Amino acid sequence: MALTLMSCSLLPHTINTASLQPTNQIEINTNTKQLISGTKQQQIADTSISGLIKILEQKYRLYKLEDSPEAKAASQELVKIGKAAVPKLINALRKNRIFLTLGVAETLLKIAENDSSVVPILINRLGDKNLQVRFGAMKALENHLFAPELKKAAQNKNPRIAAGAIYTLGKVADDNSIILPFLNHKNSLIRRSTALSLASTRNKKPLEVFAIVKNALEDEDAFIRVNSASILTLSLGYRKEVSQVIEIGDINKISKILVEGTENKDSLIRFTAVQVLTFI
């Protein structure tokens, strides 16, 4: 009996149940808490990004953030967030709202300027099935800093990625003659994208370029057709090469394409067509 009492007196008066918990269970509980905490933080971050994009959508005005103080402030916050905001920004392009697309593209460009790892993400989106995503990616890549990556992408096996890269490269390269060889590419999308890019600037083969742009009036892609009609319309009268390739019948065709463009379901195509018709 004395032995029993002595044995009992050696036991602690209180028992710490945590000390009886298996070590691996403690680790699981800790990891779970960290996971929950991380999930909540991510949810807060996602909400913040979505809210900032909503401001871009509501407050962005024509052509640049400088004219939209509230949208500019939201864009600056998104740039600070950086790469983490890119997936939601790209997804926002799918809303089919042209002013939002322009604001998002400008924001993505600034993020890519700060973080070069975003550039391959944007180049990959040049192949997206959604027109607004492709256009947004092209606008976001309009910086001479991205020319080396665009040169590589111009050789991509995906025609959409190659065409988008070539079109953008022609706008940002110090010498746009770098894309001239693509005028003879076997793929019509690449040929016409090259011509459209060159037609918007001075180039070494204007007659050939405008002839291809004229042919693009027959393209199955409404965006290519409207872009072609837009460039020919805006160039007519001050680029003699246009007068050399355009005939009377083509004027009626161009007008029809632009009018039809104003009723297209895509806001980018409608916007482009309305802009040109307003100009003339």
Image (tube, grey):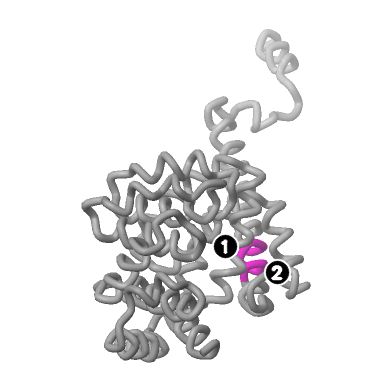
Q: Quadrant of residue 16?
A: top right
Count up the numbered dots: 2
At x 73% / y 59%, what residue is drawn?
A: 76
At x 29% / y 49%, what residue is drawn?
A: 158
At x 53% / y 48%, what residue is drawn?
A: 173
- Please tell me how crowded label 2 is: few (under 14), some (14-19), or many (20+) other residues with Cα within 10 Å: many
Q: Is residue 275 left or right of residue 269?
A: right
Q: CA distance from mark 1 to mark 2?
A: 11 Å
Q: Quadrant of the N terminus?
A: top right
Helix, strand or loop at mark 2? helix
User: Which residue position holds label 1?
Assistant: 105
Find the magenta span and give its range. Answer: 47-53
Main SS class of the magenta portion in the image: helix
Specify which label sits upstream in the sequence, 1 or 2: 2
- Please tell me how crowded label 1 is: few (under 14), some (14-19), or many (20+) other residues with Cα within 10 Å: many
Image location of residue 277, percent across then percent down = 48, 89
Query: Looking at numbered disc 2 in the image, what kind of residue is underneath it?
Result: Leu
Of residues 241 and 271, the one nearer the viewer is 241
Of residues 240 and 227, the one nearer the viewer is 240
Image location of residue 260, percent across then percent down = 35, 89
User: Which residue position holds label 2?
Assistant: 65
Query: Looking at numbered disc 1 in the image, what kind of residue is underneath it?
Result: Ala
Q: Which residue of the protein is positioned furthest toward the left in this rendering?
A: 186
Q: Can residue 77 be found in the magenta stretch? A: no
At x 67% / y 73%, what residue is drawn?
A: 55
